[in-house]
Image (cartoon, grey):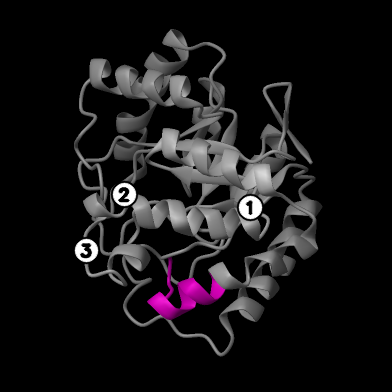
Amino acid sequence: MTINCKGKLIDLSTPKVMGILNITPDSFYDGGKFNSDAKILNQVEKMLVEGATFIDIGAYSSRPNADHISEDEELKRLIPVLETIVNQFPQILISVDTFRSKVAKKSIEVGACMINDISGGTLDEHMFKTIGELKVPYILMHIQGNPQTMQSNPSYENVTREVLKYFSEKLLALKLEKVNDIILDVGFGFGKTLNHNYELLKNLAHFKTFDLPILTGVSRKSMLYNLLDSSAKEALNATSIANTIALLNGTSILRVHDIKEAVETIKIVEQVS
């Protein structure tokens, strides 16, 4: 199972790590932390040295009830940072976390190689067509609602079945736009209750039916620390446990804040697989 990033084939038969770099002032765990070029470049270098294959950069906070920002503001935050990173690390594989097709297009033009869309194309009708034209890997995520409304009252008759149906429909639309490299993300925490999240984690292997790479993003999320009555800062151990379950159920990419621990988790799981 491979994906093509900037002409480089990435083999996902061994799981890979995607490091999270939030350049937002209000992300739930590290918002506002990386607020200068020096801090950003140091963090990127640290993640690459620790074993990240991809770096996922987000300039729009999608935590529940986060402030909505304009497309112009997102571009103003994102593009200079992207240019700085690509200039310093020319071979880097950057995924950009955006639901806007214009931001996606501009990001690829300045050196990103993949788009991570939390909305699965639901917040920008031009996204699928744009990805088809750009010919880049696309992370298709499931969400119920939008970042401002998604946690107000998430409701499903059967969350696993409904997310499977959602992917079936979206994949059909993506194939029509000739999008080839698609990665699935069930969207932990995006319009799901705590129980919905754990049901999806338990049933993650069901999504292997699509024969596509699965990305899991549970790093330090509330589904972990709320269950344990702790906090995002204290959720590293819980993250490793959840990532282990995800890997055993077929995950190909772990999207995390903590690279070293995710790399170690993969090594141990691979040793017994």
Residue 132, quarter of picture: top right
Tell me the number on the disc at residue 61. Answer: 2
Q: Secondary structure at mark 3?
A: loop
Residue range (magenta): 190-200
Q: For the residue marked with disc 2, what is the amino acid? A: Ser
Q: Position of residue 188 (x, y in %)?
A: 47, 63
**Cα gap from disc 1 to disc 2, whole angstroms:** 24 Å
Q: Residue at x 35, y 58 (%)?
A: 221
- Amino acid identity at mark 3: Ser
Q: Is residue 67 left or right of residue 186?
A: left
Q: Say which element carries label 2.
A: loop
Depth check: 231 or 91 in front? 231
Asked if residue 14 lies left or right of residue 33, the reply is right
Q: Is residue 79 above or below residue 245?
A: above
Q: Nearer the viewer, residue 171 or 177?
A: 171
Crowd class of label 2 (few under 14; some 14 to 19; many from 20; radius 10 Å): many
The one nearer the camera, 230 or 98, is 230
Q: Which residue is mark 1?
A: 251
First in sequence, mark 1 or 2: give its number.
2
